[in-house]
Amino acid sequence: MKIFLGNAPWKKPGYYGVRAGSRWPHFEADTSGYMPFPFFLAYGAALLRDNGFSVSLVDAIAEDIDEDEFFARMKAFQPDLVFLEVSSSSLSTDLRILERTRRELGDSVRIAFGGLHREMADPSFLETHPGLDFCLLGEYETTLLALAKALRDGDEAAGLPALAWRGPDGAVVVNSDYNLLEDLDSMPWPARDLLDMERYRDLPGGIPAPSLQIIASRGCPFGCIYCAWPQLMYGSNRYRTRDPKDVVDEIEDCVSRYGFKSFYFDDDTFNIGKKRILALAGEIRDRKINLPWAIMARADTMDREILEALKEAGLVALKYGVESGSQDLLRRVSKGLDLSKVRETVAITRELGILYHLTFMFGLPGETEETARKTIALALELDPDTVQFSIATPFPGSRFHSQLLESGHLVSTNYDEYDGYHNAVVRTDTLEPGDLIALRQEAETRWRGHCQARRG
């Protein structure tokens, strides 16, 4: 049985979309170069292949190929099942790709969606799109394998968790129980050999390319209302970890195989569980990997001992999500972040010479002009090496989205506008979407002035 996995083209003039591998599907300027690794697709491909299925994996966004080339590869493979990772932000494009897939491959092929779009769990989604056969809900790799086995063996999909499908009578059935992978070490490493690895770039602190993107954990025990993957892909805040030895085995193998010059841990939150983090740092140090690397981390779960151990193992850069300069706003969105601890951790990070990137957003519940200016002031005070300012974007199905619906503060249901940068789809009691866009622009203007002054 042949299975085609795809991250379909998603572009507009001057911009390319990032979808698979991104917790925040959005458009990047053509000059950006940023490209996340499609972890779910690559893990899914490896799992299918290990179980005897013939697999083709095409990341059209990373390869920068157009729709004609994407479909040429799909048709040449002659798949029995086509699986496409989709998102709310790219949905209009995803549905057009679906229609063309059905036209070009005919009725015999089965087509499935999965990814960051919670409405796939509603029966109306399949009812509205008759060309689509299945929706895989949440973290989909093991569900994809179970579906492939059922189709191969002529079994019904009934009973499979985390799946929406049409029953024998044509009625849509949804089993919304998440099929969460508990033992990360049971998974094969991602099928990187099916992808052009030099095209994936996430380089905090300017770590050198080509760079390996890898994860040592999944999930986050914190409850931020706006964070999509724990709510939509995992369906819980369970934090699951890999054995540090297996993680470093994978790094060594990938460096040997592909010649990577650095690596980046793109965990939802890397630095949870001090004992494990110190063990992982020790494993990297003792094996003499001798490459610069970076992480995605929380400032309030970091301390000097951890930072010193990570630096000794080669850490040169990291990202901290701060999001707001208002302690009250952080409380409202259940982030549980103490800004005094952020200041302390940033000071240690700077003292140790580790480069740091900070992220902030405007438009969280309760945002005012005063709180937004506190955020700008905090960004300048913390003086990061690089910074990201965005506009809070409520993915359907998240608690943030539900709160906005209840308060009447969601101003658009056009998912093409859910980019978190050029558009604002939320308002607050005192700020309209245009105000939020203006505040983001003001933040970037003041940041550029700050950087010029810093350079002298």
Image (tube, helix red, strand yellow):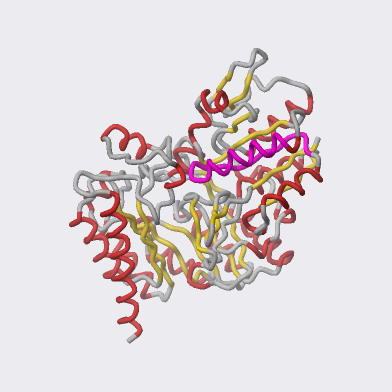
- Image quadrant where one finds the C terminus: bottom left
Q: Is residue 407 left or right of residue 121?
A: left
Please check the rendered image and state whether residue 100 is part of the magenta-colored stretch, yes or no: yes
Q: Residue furthest top?
A: 169
Where is residue 373 drawn, in percent x and y? 22, 61
The residue closer to the viewer here, 351 or 169, is 169
Q: Residue, x 67% and y 22% (percent of image)?
A: 157
Q: Please count the marks in the image.
A: 0
Q: Nearer the viewer, residue 289 or 236?
A: 236
Q: Quadrant of the N terminus?
A: top right
Q: Is residue 62 above or below residue 86?
A: below
Residue appearing at x 54%, y 54% in the figure? 17
In this rendering, position of residue 438 left or right of residue 145? left
On the image, the x and y values in percent for residue 217 come to 53, 49
In the image, is 108 to the left or to the right of 122?
right
Residue at x 48%, y 55% (from the top left corner): 270
Front residue of this view, candidates 91 and 333: 91
Whether 287 is drawn above or below 131: the answer is below
The image shows residue 392 at horizontal and vertical percentages of 35, 50
Tell whether position 148 is magenta: no
Quadrant in the picture for residue 61: bottom right
Q: Which residues are magenta?
A: 79-103
- Image spot of residue 179 (x, y percent): 57, 32
**Nearest to the observer: residue 157 or residue 441:** 441
Identity of the residue furthest to the bottom in this view: 456
